[in-house]
Image (cartoon, rainbow, N blue to C red):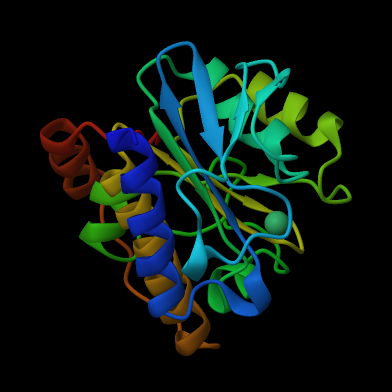
Amino acid sequence: MSEARRELVAAGAKLAALGLSPGSSGNLSIREGDRMLITPTGADLGDLDPDGLAELSPHGDHLGGPKPSKEFPLHGAFYRRDPAATAVVHLHSRHAAGVACLAPWSPRSAIPPLTPYFVMRVGQCPLIPYAAPGDPAQAELLEALDFDFRAALLQNHGPIASGRSLAAAVDAAVELEEVAALLLGLGQHVPRLLEPAEITALTTRYGTPWDH
Ligand code: ZN
């Protein structure tokens, strides 16, 4: 069994244990050479089978294993956009899904720069207009956005985060849920946001994208 399969199973168990995969929702993938391994349709992230993962080409051709999650086009879009992305995590975690139902803070980020860890681990995170789950047109739209980002909120649906490693993608998805909970908790209060110079100091050091 490959290391990638073991990593994917462990990441699914971690996200499920954190309560971020309600009702067996969410899907994970990892890039392995010229293919991606992705969780199968209807999979429980807390109980993945390392030998029961779907194998797809970056363009979504089915190469082996069970039928993939129908949300696979979004995973492929992140891999095609960013050659350095090696893993993608998509969840229906409650707070991030809640913020995905609100108007975005800006065209490039649904969530404002509230905390350094959001800027360091996630970076700007655009809201992608609503489409039915699995609609390839939404993935094409995400792929075509002409600015840098590693995570997004799918409108009225939930968060999706990529990473240079599966651990980084998991951390980004967890941080996205945390900052979304913080934003919702602030309610009508007007928060102080990080200043542009404070953001630049973080993005320069940690390499995450944020356009002012
Ligand atoms: Zn979904």
For image coordinates 52% across by 33% down, the residue present is 37
- Provide residue 51's location: percent of width, then percent of height: 50, 43
Picture residue at 10% right of the left edge, 35% below the top: 205
Q: Residue at x 56, y 16 (%)?
A: 80
On the image, the x and y values in percent for residue 183 come to 47, 76
Q: Quadrant of ligand 1?
A: bottom right
Q: Nearer the viewer, residue 54 or 89?
A: 54
Image position of 78 with respect to 135: above or below: above
Image: 187 above or below 119: below
Residue 207 image point, x, y percent: 22, 31
Q: Residue at x 72, y 60 (%)?
A: 42
Task: Work out whether residue 185 or residue 170 is closer to the camera in this orientation and state it.
Answer: 170
Image side of residue 182 versus residue 136, left or right: left
165 shown above or below 157: above
Q: Is residue 53 left or right of residue 25?
A: left
Location of residue 61 in the rendering, given as x and y in whole percent from the top left corner:
73, 17
Figure quadrant of the N terminus: top left
